[in-house]
Amino acid sequence: MYALIDGNNFYVSCERVFRPALNHTPVVVLSNNDGCAISRSNEAKALGVAMGEPFFKIADLQQKAGLVALSANFALYGDMSQRMMTVAAGLGPEQEIYSIDESFVSLAGVQGDLLVRARRMRERILQWTGLPTCVGIGETKTLAKLANHIAKTAERKPGVYPSHLAQVCHLGYLSPQARQALYQASDVGEIWGVGRRIGSRLKEAKVNTVWDFLQLEASIVRQNFGVVLERTWRELHGVPCIALEHAPASKQEIACTRSFGQGVTTLEPLIQAVGEFASRAGEKLRRQHSCASQVLVFIRTSPFREGPRYSQSVVIPLRRPSANTAHLVSAATAGLQLIYKPGYQFAKAGVMLLDLSADDVHQGELDLEETQDAAQSVQTPRLMHALDTLNQRYGRGTLGMASTGLTEQSRLWSMRQERLTPQYTTSWQDLPIARA
DNA sequence: TCTGGGGTCCTAGGACCC
DNA sequence: TCTGGGGTCCTAGGACCC
């Protein structure tokens, strides 16, 4: 048995902890660059704001409907997330942190009434962190996900599901008849693993609900939709196929990409941007104690704008695996020079580190051609460590490699505060804390 | 004017080999 | 009408997740 604990409208809820005046108000939190809405309060959803909707399309709702728009503050959300996860972990012996606002907890061997325990844990999270959550419980992770959807929907849209399932829904406590009714009331697109594409293909085949999907033959699902969806089908039938993953595996690739506030036409600001992205990707790389063997850099024009289109990427192999910012930056900028073409309005760029390996594998692997750099290389890990520590302590961009050129151009991709609803532009650190 | 930023896994098809 | 038959490795692209 698994539980899925999920924060409601997570980023918005985090903001509301520090600004209780925003309760019962339509609120959205915007992505980097204030580009689009990535978290919406129930009131904002009721206004018709879609997930990922561009801000310029909903900006008028600030005047018309009192919508409040906030720039994302990921440092705050990460901190709130940790507190929520710590409390949630108490529900069972093992926890998998699945995303910033969701965790699975294994309930194997847990004694007593699971529903009561889950309700109590939910209350505790609310009390200790101020964050509202919903809990779904089922025999597999996919069923726990579905149960969580039911718990959330029963609370937000009364009438769709029985009201006693709101906030906490335990499928294992329901009769087969009650489960069938729930599955018949659930859209097939709500299944974890069924996205837009597969959802519409299923509907073409008259598979509209979770119940319809369960009636298919496993072999038909496999044949038409592949092994991944067949696994989902089995999970919905109560057969566990997806294990809990504690100790999250280290990343197989690391990316740092940003859209720019305005189009960029010249090479110089792109070099600075790409240098900065490579540095940040390097920090993530060192945090998980890995080295990269290849650096990918890409630039592209906006797919939404008129004008000539251009999108290109290149992979630069490193002479040997490295986690050294200097190596990463010079590979990224060299790659950029290869793919850059004048005459375009670039809207986005990024750096990805590929072919990662554990960094201890390469200790003492200096080859002859590099011996003149040996003294320097020995110093490198300490230098990189100092770099990371300083940047962590004093903020991004405190210290960087000379070639990256700091500060000036970071305006290109930094958040644009002027877009926010004006009375809400104060930093959260300056606000009184409503709940400790 | 203004459209996020990460990730994972699977599959099809091409290149190459014997 | 027929065009050998497999393997393996790599890459691009599609699909999904939050």
Image (cartoon, coloured by chain):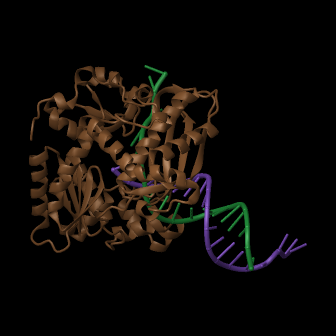
Chain colours: A brown, B green, C purple
Q: Residue at x 31, y 72 (%)?
A: A238
Which quarter of the rendered picture does the N terminus of chain A lie within? bottom left
Can residue A11 be seen here? The reply is yes
Q: Residue at x 36, y 26 (%)?
A: A416
Quarter residue A165 falls in:
bottom left
Q: Residue at x 49, y 46 (%)?
A: A328
* Side of A304 relative to A169 (left or right): right
- Percent across and percent down for residue A162 are 19, 55
Q: Is residue A325 above or below residue A4?
A: above
- Percent across and percent down for residue A171 are 22, 65
- In the image shown, does A6 or A153 lie closer to the viewer? A6
Q: Is residue A73 above or below residue A379?
A: above
- Percent across and percent down for residue A170 are 19, 63
Can residue A36 be seen here? The reply is no
* Side of A14 relative to A275 (left or right): left
Q: Residue at x 40, y 37 (%)?
A: A400
Quarter residue A19 falls in:
top left
- In the image shown, does A144 or A210 lie closer to the viewer? A144
- Percent across and percent down for residue A108 are 20, 73
- In the image shown, does A90 or A275 lie closer to the viewer? A275
Q: Is residue A230 above or below residue A406?
A: below
Which quarter of the rendered picture does the C terminus of chain A lie within? top left
- In the image shown, does B9 or A3 lie closer to the viewer? B9
